[in-house]
Image (spheres, helix red, strand yellow):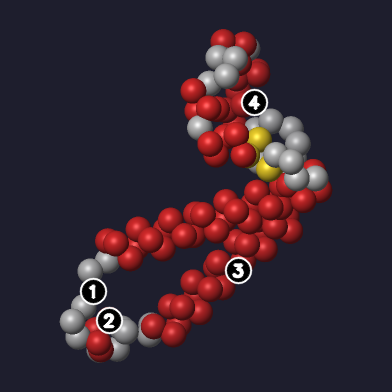
Amino acid sequence: MNNRHNRAFLLTGFLAALAIAVFLSPFASKHPDGLVRVSEDLQFHRKEAPEPPAGKLPPARIFDGYALKGVPEYLATPLAGLVGTLATFGLAWGIGKLTVPKSDNPRESSGDR
C-alpha cells in the first residue's frame, strides 16, 4: 500500500469518527452505563468522594460529563464529541510521529519497494 492509500484510509477513518461523534452522539442513551451502572446496582456509589481529586483538574471543570459547560444542551454533546475526537486523533498522530523512525531513503518512507 502506498502513501496515498494510507492517507486516504486515515482521512476516511478520521471523517467517519468525526461524523459519529458529532451526528450520532446526541442519540446516545441518557441512562448510566458501565461502571456507573454497576456502582449504582451494588450501592457502592454512595462511598464516592463529594468532589474527587480529578474533578479539580481544568478539563473536568470545562467538561461536565460528556457536555461542555455554558453551551446549550443540544450543542454541548456534539461539540464535546468533536473536541474529544480531535484530541484523540491528534494525540495518536503525535505519538506516531514521535515513535516511528524516519527513513533516509525516500522510496522506503513512501512504501514503494
| Residue 76 located left or right of residue 56 | right
Residue 28 is labelled as none
Contact between marks 4 and 1 (CB within 8 A): the answer is no
**Numbered badge on residue 102:** 1
* Amino acid at dot 2: Ser
Tag 3 residue: 15
* Disc number for residue 37: 4
What's the residue at 65%, 18% (across, down)? 41
Marks 1 and 2 sit apart, C-alpha to C-alpha, by 7 Å
Say whether residue 27 is visible. Answer: no
Circle 1 sits in a helix, a strand or a loop, which is it? loop
Residue 77 position, x and y percent, is 71, 47
Q: Are marks 1 and 3 in contact (CB under 8 Å)?
A: no
Q: Which residue is mark 2?
A: 109
State yes or no: discs 1 and 2 in contact (Cβ < 8 Å): yes
Mark-to-mark CA distance, 2 and 4: 47 Å
